[in-house]
Image (cartoon, grey):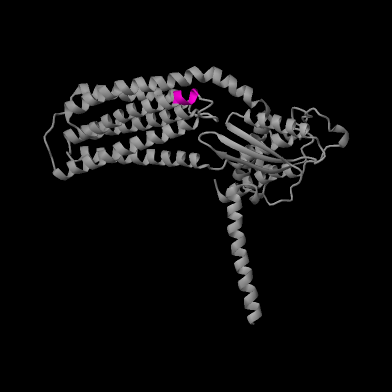
Amino acid sequence: MSASSSATANEHADAIHSLGTNTASAPAQDQLDEVTTVNDGDPLGLGQHKRANVTQRQMEVDYPSANKRHMKKFYTRQNALIDQFLESGDEERLAALDTLENGPKVKFAVNASFVVNFFLFVIQLYAAISTGSLSLFATAADAFMDLVSSIVMLITSRMAARPSVYKYPVGRTRIETIGIIMFCCLMTTVAIQLIVESGRALGEGASEHEQLHIIPIVFVGVAIFCKGSLCIYCFFLRRYPAVHVFFIDHRNDIIVNAFGLTMSIIGSRVVWYLDPLGAILIGLLILCSWAANAFEHVWLLVGKSAPNEFISKLIYLVVTHDTRIQKVDTCRAYHAGQNYYVEVDIVMDEELPLKVTHDVSQTLQRKLEGLANVERAYVHVDYENEHDIYEEHKPLYEITERRSIKQRVKALLSRNKEQAS
C-alpha cells in the first residue's frame, strides 16, 4: 500500500477513535441500577455511511481529481470496518458456531498432517538411501523434522485445550505460540545442518552414487501429491494457528520436494555439482522461511500492539455498551500469544453508586471477552480523565520519571545559561 493510502486509512482509524471521547453523559433520571445498554443494531448510524458501489469507475466519477485506486481501497476498508463494528456484538455466538462446525476439520487437518508426515519420511528416506542424492537427503531430513515438529504441535495443542485453573489461572493457550516457535527452531536447525553437509560435499568434488531409478521418482511424486492435497485442505482453515503452521509447512514441502527431485535428476544425469548445490538452496529456503515465521511469533509473546482497526472496534463496543459511560479514557490491546489482552479505562459519574459502576464494568468486561480473539479483558472505572495516563502503571510511570528527569536537567541548564548571559 502506498504512503498516501496508508495515511488516509490511519486518519479514518483516528476518526473512529474520537467516538470514545465525545460520548454525551447520561441524564440523571436514567441512572438506574440496571445496566442500560444502548439500543442494539446500529446505535451510531454507521450503516448509512457504507458505500454500495466502490468500483474504480465510480470513484473516478465521484472524485475526478483523486487517485481512484486509493479511494477504492479507502472505501473498501471503511465498509469492512463498519461491518466489523456492527457484527461485533454477535461475535461470541458466531465463534462458538464456527468452533462447533470447524473443530473436527481442524483436528483432522492436524492429525492427517502428522500421519502423512510419518509415511512421507519413510518414503523419502528410502528414495535418498537408494540413490545417495544429497538433494533427496535434504528432502528426507526436512520430512523428518516435519515429523518431529508435528509431534510438538500435537502436544502443545492438547495442552492448550486442557487448562489447569489452579496452576495456570489464565489458561495455557500461549503454549501454542511457544510450540510454533519450537517448530521453527527445529526447522532452522536442520536447514543449517543441510547447508553445512552440502557445502562439504561440494568442496570434496564429484563422487559416485547410484543412478536415479523410476521407483524413487514415483515415491517423491506421491509425496508431492499428498502434500499438495493437504496444502489445499489446510488453506481453507489457515485462520487457525495450528493449521496455518501446517499450511506453510505443506506449501514449502511442495517446493522443496519438486526442486529437490529436479536437482537430483539433473545432478545424476547431467552435472554432478547441481545435486549438492540444490541441497544448499533447499536449506536456505527452509532457513529463511521458518526464521521469519519464528520472529513473527516471538513478537506476539513480547506483547505487540493490536492493529488500529481492532482497537477502534473495542472503542465502538465500549461507547455503545451503556448510556452512563461518559468517556473512554484509554483503550489498549496487545498480544499475549495468538490472542489479545485488552485494558479499558472508562469515565462514569462520580455520584453513581458502587453497585452500578461495578455492574456496568463487569458486563462490559464480559462483552469484550466474548470477542473471538480476546483472551482476557480488564475494565477500570474512573470519575475524571484529567490525570496523566503514564502514571497509572509501573512501566509507563518509569518512562515518565525518566522523561521528567531529562526535562528538569534541560530546564536547569537553560536557566543557568540565561543567568550567565
To which quarter of the image does residue 309 belong?
A: top right
Asked if residue 298 is among those painted magenta in the image, a careful observer would answer no
Indicate the position of residue 415 as horizontal and vertical percent values.
Answer: 65, 74
Indicate the position of residue 417 as horizontal and vertical percent values.
Answer: 62, 77
To which quarter of the image does residue 317 belong?
A: top right
Direction right: furthest residue: 29
Q: Is 280 positioned to the left or the right of 238 in the image?
A: left
Q: Is residue 212 visible?
A: no
Name the residue nearer the viewer: 9 or 402. 402
Name the residue nearer the viewer: 93 or 5. 93
Indicate the position of residue 244 as horizontal and vertical percent values.
Answer: 45, 30
Q: Which portion, as a residue range, is magenta?
A: 157-162
Q: Is 102 positioned to the left or the right of 228 in the image?
A: right
Name the residue nearer the viewer: 170 or 304. 170
Direction front: furthest residue: 166
- The residue drawn where x is 31% and y is 33% is 256
Indicate the position of residue 396 as horizontal and vertical percent values.
Answer: 60, 50
Q: Which quarter shows the N terminus?
A: top right
- The residue drawn where x is 55% and y is 48% is 2
To which quarter of the image does residue 170 belong?
A: top right
Tell me: residue 253, above or below residue 64.
above
Q: Is residue 23 visible?
A: yes
Tell me: residue 407, above or below residue 333.
below
Q: Is 385 positioned to the left or the right of 331 in the image?
A: right
- The residue drawn where x is 20% and y is 22% is 214
Tell me: residue 310, above or below residue 408.
above
- Numbered circles on residues, count: 0
Q: Which quarter shows the C terminus?
A: bottom right
- The residue drawn where x is 17% and y is 38% is 272
Predominant SS of the magenta segment: helix
